[in-house]
Image (cartoon, rainbow, N blue to C red):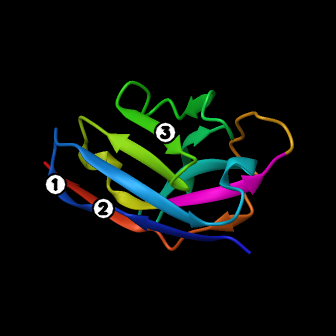
Amino acid sequence: QVQLVESGGGLVQAGASLRLSCAASVRTFSSWAMGWFRQAPGKEREFVAAISRSGGTTSYADSVKGRFTISRDNALNTVYLQMNSLKPEDTARYFCASRRLIVDTVVTSGYEYWGQGTQVTVTS
């Protein structure tokens, strides 16, 4: 069983930055690929960013490329999402997710465990 706890959300103005964190309670965090997803009211959950087990490979949704950066610290069992130049359309609940993988690669689907999410609201 993996427990994921997100933090760092908040209410900000357009153009601001936020850093989300996701702490994982798992013995071998480096065995898990991690991802960030978001869901706005009335919309389906969508992929935001993903990172491989080692952190060496990342992937981003086109809508956040160049503005968001995913990273991880395997010693701290934590994955981060640095969000810069926030826009009102980034408003959503952000979830982190984990998927156990044998290979060190990035995946954008098939995640097994999910956190409860943290709310990000961007005003214009």
Residue 97 drawn at (x, y percent): 61, 58
Find disc 2 in the rendering and name its residue.
9
**Magenta-highlighted residues:** 95-101
Disc 3 and disc 1: Cα gap in Å?
Answer: 22 Å
Q: Which residue corresponds to mark 1?
A: 12
Q: Which residue is mark 3?
A: 71
Prevailing secondary structure class for the magenta stretch in the rendered image: strand
Would you place residue 114 above or below residue 69 in this image?
Answer: below
**First of labels 3, 2 by sequence position:** 2
Q: Nearer the viewer, residue 25 or 64?
A: 25
| Left or right of residue 102: residue 122 | left
Amino acid at pointer 1: Val
Q: N-terminal of the two: label 3 or label 1?
A: 1
Circle 2: residue type: Gly
Q: Which quadrant of the figure contains the N terminus?
A: bottom right
- Judged from this view, the residue extending furthest toward the top is 66
